[in-house]
Amino acid sequence: MSEQLQATVVVHGGAGGSRDQDDGCRFAARTGRDRLAGGASALEGAVAACVALEDDGRYNAGSGAVLCLDGHTIEMDAAVMDSQGALGAVACIQRVKNPVLVAQAITRTPHWLLAGEGAERFARTAGFPIHHQISERQRAKHERLMATLGSREPATPGVANRAFADYWNYDTPRVFNPCDTVGAVTRAADGTFAVACSTGGSAPSLLGRVGDTPIIGSGFYAGPDGAVAVTGIGEHIVRRLLAYTVYGWIAGGMPVDEAIRRGVDLFPREIDVGVIAVSRTETGMHSNREMPCAVVSAGDA
Ligand code: ASP
């Protein structure tokens, strides 16, 4: 008989977000916890929490995903993984409402990651309808970004604004969005773990840019000792394989809080980074920026 652990869901709404958005995280964590209580797997619980965050509209994922520099395209990344071998991800997918559900559907294919047009075609084959809606919030953010790109203030720390003009690869004439992804990690009562994460990417970025979110070991990892989800500037996170590094420390016996703080401390202060994690007995959330987040366990209100 398998041992019974306390079912728990930890979620984040992105490094650089606002704690005013914790209510959406609490709702998402409760949604995941209720699914676990109803007998869903760790993976189904993590995906349910992530869908709630994608549908919220205030986070940079799904309905709230950032606009690309052309002011029209939305490219999204998402991934899922559990401790029983399920693995699926999408990169640069357009015109779907819930990229994390497409990532979950990919776990049933012979592949683990589909990108771009192929990912969108797969989504249609799997029954996901066309969805392209630009939120007012993202439209306003885009206008602010355009203003910053046209100024002397760098829109991305350490990157000259003109780099985006020099390498412009959109169809539209060259014109002149910050991070806040979502993620959920779960521990089911049967001792299995899962992670689901989803993002509209970082902005500004060139067309086709992929960050850490759909890259195993960078933006996410789940195994027999826990699950980890990461948020922040993907170009920096992938170089440190952050999710797998933190997972390895937890698997080696380091307390969760120490592991995630050590992970965040690998980065200079000007780089946004946040990590959430769950192990057999602990949970943790830490970021070097404000980061909306929540943890809900079986028995919590
Ligand atoms: N990590 C995401 C990316 O670089 C953005 C974020 O977490 O806010 O695409």
Image: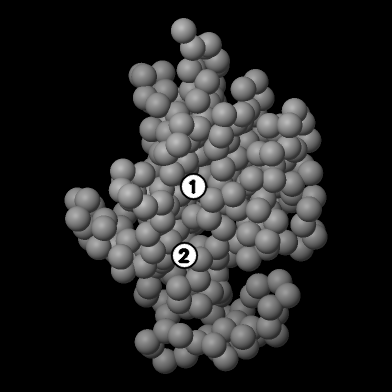
Residue 126 at x, y = what percent?
22, 51
Q: Secondary structure beneath disc 1?
A: strand
Mark 2, Cα crowd under 10 Å, few <14 / some 14-19 / many 20+, is many
Residue at (80, 60) in percent of width and height: 268
Q: To which residue does mark 1 refer?
A: 197
In three-dimensional space, the C-alpha distance between marks 2 and 1, rounded to whole angstroms, equals 15 Å
Q: Which of marks 2 and 1 is nearer the N terminus?
A: 2
Residue 74 at x, y = what percent?
39, 67
- Using residue 84 as the reference point, say whether residue 248 is left or right of it: right
Q: To which residue does mark 2 refer?
A: 66
Residue at (55, 15) in percent of width and height: 5
Asked if one can make out residue 51 in the rendered structure from this viewpoint, the answer is yes
Front residue of 30 and 198: 198
- Using residue 57 as the reference point, say whether residue 166 is left or right of it: right
- Using residue 121 as the reference point, say whether residue 291 is left or right of it: right
Amino acid of disc 1: Cys
Asked if one can make out residue 285 in the rendered structure from this viewpoint, the answer is no
Amino acid of disc 2: Val
Whether residue 186 is situated above or below residue 76 in the rendered picture: above
